[in-house]
Image (spheres, rainbow, N blue to C red):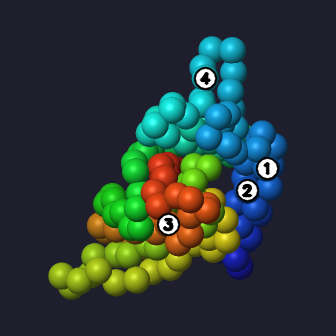
Amino acid sequence: MKKLFILTVLTIAALFIKAHAIAQSESRTPAKSASSTKSFDFSDNKKATSMMPIMGDALPVIQYIEDTMNVEIVRIEYDLIFDKKVTYRTLYKGWKYGIVVIGDYRIKKINVHLYKYVNKDWQFVRSGKGEDYFSMVNEEPLEKGDYLMQITADEFEEGYKAGHYAIIIYH
């Protein structure tokens, strides 16, 4: 019963992040990112190669995770993606992890797939429910283990074949 309650709370938190932290941002365009401020310009450059738009898109999520959920971010990674990327992390028993991926304005649909290394093989654990440029999975390991997170850019906005993404891991 306790695990069902925790799962429900994490699901509600994930929906809140998606509905409020990201939805409250400005429209996503190459010229202006979600979190432009007087201190930073999160616009893309003329070549559309800047990391600033994805950093601006991730900032409200980072702030929500740290300030509202009051949990610790243990990893943030930004990268360019054409179709798939992987990243690895050891997850520990006793922690409840959240893994969030965000795509920049060029990515229409992104997802995250979680695998655990068992008996010299990567075994599928679960996928996020990536219906747009945001996806998330939760994991509470029963024992310490090595995990692979596969990020997939399932669909790009018209005219784009690549984009930047952020992956945020917290516990």
Residue tagged 1: 23
Query: Is 70 situated left or right of 50 in this image?
Result: right
C-beta proximity under 8 Å, tags 2 and 4: no
Report, in whole angstroms, how far the alpha carbon at label 2 lies from the one at label 4.
Answer: 23 Å
Determine if residue 100 is in view. Answer: no
Query: Is 22 situated left or right of 127 in this image?
Result: right
Residue tagged 2: 18
Please state the horizontal and vertical placement of residue 60, each as a whole percent of the image: 67, 38
Residue ranking furthest to the left: 120
Q: State the residue in front, 19 or 121.
A: 19
What is the three-letter code of the residue carrying label 2? Answer: Lys
What is the three-letter code of the residue carrying label 3? Answer: Ala
Residue shown at the point (45%, 80%) measured from the top left: 125
Residue shown at the point (63%, 14%) measured from the top left: 39
Q: Which mark is residue 153?
A: 3
C-beta proximity under 8 Å, tags 2 and 1: yes
Query: How many neighbours does mark 3 have within 10 angstroms: few (below 14), some (14-19), or many (20 or more)?
Result: many
Residue shown at the point (78%, 39%) measured from the top left: 26
Secondary structure found at label 3: strand
Image quarter hosting the N terminus: bottom right
Report, in whole angstroms, how far the alpha carbon at label 3 lies from the one at label 1.
Answer: 20 Å
What is the three-letter code of the residue carrying label 1? Answer: Ala
Query: How many neighbours does mark 4 have within 10 angstroms: few (below 14), some (14-19), or many (20 or more)?
Result: some
Q: Which mark is residue 152?
A: none
Secondary structure found at label 2: helix
Residue tagged 4: 41
